[in-house]
């Protein structure tokens, strides 16, 4: 397995939105590498979160890369608005309900100088994303069903992480393998052992008293 630096991407879905700017400064100080923005439309997932205006506000508060996860229909239509808001990476879903032309959407994201990512729900087999791996920079393996924070990690998803890691071993260009949902110190360890290098975490960081401690524990440091 290729040893890579671990990237911790706190999901601001779990932040206190009444003091969002402070929360962003705090996770930045605590050692976050990226900021994960979960965008939900009430159609692709049964929840509504926030849109490009909020991402633009986050952009003004930090220099950290903004990792935008679109859990929405018609991601092709909305992606340019997130590019404009300052996203550094934009991940779209592969499921047919996401209703977009995957290759065309990924190409448009790259042409906008943004890193394209692809995600798959727990029910979706790895085979659904395999044909696109040479076109993306990030594979986001959902380790819970998308829509809500605070759910329990599904260890069976590690099979997909392993397959992505195997793909990386066989190809010179490495993709980031990101896990999202139920990530805490214990599940992060398992994900890293299986080949993940990007950890998204909402609850385990923002519900912790000490953000820096929570982030370093995700990296496997005490
Ligand atoms: C789930 C989102 C996740 C979520 C993670 O729909 O994509 O990013 O906010 O939250 P926790 O860490 O609480 O599982
Ligand atoms: Zn997410």
Image: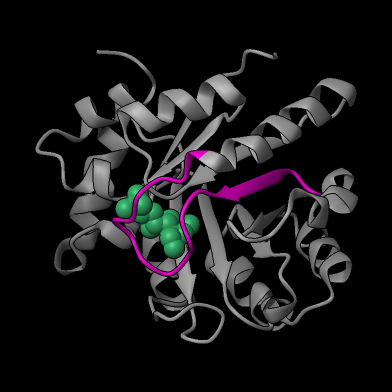
Q: Position of residue 40 (x, y in %)?
A: 47, 75
Q: Nearer the viewer, residue 133 or 34?
A: 133
Picture quadrant of residue 124? bottom right
Q: Position of residue 93 (x, y in %)?
A: 67, 65
- Residue 66, placed above or below residue 189: below
Residue at the left extreme of this rendering: 209
Measuring 48% from the left and 62% from the top, which residue is drawn there? 145
- Residue 140, placed above or below residue 161: below
- Describe residue 160's horizontal placement relative to residue 19 as left or right: right
Q: Position of residue 66 (x, y in %)?
A: 50, 52
* Picture colour scheme: one colour
Q: Quadrant of the N terminus?
A: top right
Magenta span: chief secondary structure: loop
Q: Position of residue 125 (x, y in %)?
A: 73, 54
How many dots with numbers?
A: 0
**Residue 152: within the magenta?**
yes
**Residue 41: within the magenta?**
no
- Describe residue 51's horizontal placement relative to residue 108 as left or right: left
Q: Which residues are magenta?
A: 136-155
- Residue 55, placed above or below residue 52: above
Measuring 45% from the left and 52% from the top, which residue is drawn there? 36
Q: Is residue 37 visible?
A: no
Measuring 43% from the left and 23% from the top, which residue is drawn there? 189
- Residue 54, placed above or below residue 182: below
């Amino acid at each position: 397995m290729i040893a890579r630096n671990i990237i911790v991407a706190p999901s601001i879905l779990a932040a206190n939105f009444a003091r969002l700017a402070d929360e962003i400064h705090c996770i930045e100080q605590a050692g976050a590498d990226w900021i994960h923005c979960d965008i939900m439309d009430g159609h692709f997932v049964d929840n509504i979160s926030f849109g490009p205006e909020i991402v633009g506000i986050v952009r003004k508060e930090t220099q950290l890369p903004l990792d935008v996860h679109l859990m929405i229909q018609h991601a092709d239509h909305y992606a340019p608005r997130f590019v404009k808001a300052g996203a550094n990476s934009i991940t779209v879903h592969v499921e047919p309900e996401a209703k977009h032309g995957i290759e065309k959407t990924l190409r448009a994201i790259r042409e906008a100088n943004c890193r394209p990512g692809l995600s798959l729900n727990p029910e979706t087999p790895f085979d659904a994303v395999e044909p696109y791996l040479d076109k993306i920079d990030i594979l986001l393996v959902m380790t819970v069903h998308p829509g809500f924070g605070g759910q329990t990690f599904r260890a069976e998803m590690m099979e997909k992480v392993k397959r992505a890691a195997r793909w990386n071993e066989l190809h010179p260009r490495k993709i980031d393998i990101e896990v999202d949902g139920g990530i805490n110190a214990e599940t992060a360890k398992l994900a890293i052992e299986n080949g993940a290098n990007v950890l998204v975490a909402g609850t385990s960081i923002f519900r912790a008293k000490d953000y820096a401690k929570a982030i370093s524990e995700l990296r496997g440091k005490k």
